[in-house]
């Protein structure tokens, strides 16, 4: 579930987090945001940007959250 993915990510197990998130509903802005963050950490910025844009389509206010996460700063710059 989402909490498992978050725990993996927090522990630095980004590939495991990505695997768990791949099984979650992609219609959830939190899932899309976390997917973007993990992909960004893995250097897959183009794919991360797709999930970030999807996240913002579901919840435009998540852009404010992205400004607080260093992993997301590159994606915010690309968006602007």
Image: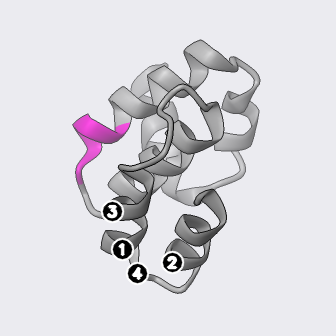
* Nearest to the observer: residue 47 or residue 73: 47
- Answer whether residue 41 is visible to the viewer in this image: no
Give residue 39's position: percent from left, percent from top: 34, 53
Q: Residue 16 shows which numbered tag?
A: 1
As measured in the structure, the alpha-carbon distance from the residue carrying label 2 to the one carrying label 1 is 6 Å
SS label for mark 4: loop
Which mark is nearer the camera, 4 or 3? 3
Helix, strand or loop at disc 2?
helix
Magenta stretch encompasses residue 46: yes
Do the numbered discs 3 and 1 sit on residues whose CB atoms are within 8 Å? Answer: yes
Q: What kind of element bears circle 1?
A: helix
List x then y, in percent, for residue 22: 36, 49
Residue holding disc 4? 13
CB-based contact (under 8 Å), mark 4 and mark 2:
yes
The first of marks 2 and 1 along the sequence is: 2
The residue under the point 30% across, 71% down is 15
Magenta region: which residues?
44-48
Which residue sits at x=64%, y=41%? 30
Label 3, on which residue? 19
Instruction: Please name the predominant secondary structure of the magenta segment in the image.
Output: helix
């Amino acid at each position: 579930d989402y909490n498992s993915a978050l725990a993996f990510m927090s522990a630095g197990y980004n590939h495991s987090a990505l695997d768990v998130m791949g099984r979650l509903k992609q219609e959830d802005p939190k899932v899309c945001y976390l997917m973007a963050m993990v992909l960004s950490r893995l250097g897959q910025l183009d794919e991360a940007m797709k999930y970030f844009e999807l996240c913002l389509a579901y919840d435009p206010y998540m852009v404010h959250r992205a400004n607080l996460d260093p992993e997301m700063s590159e994606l915010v710059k690309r968006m602007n």
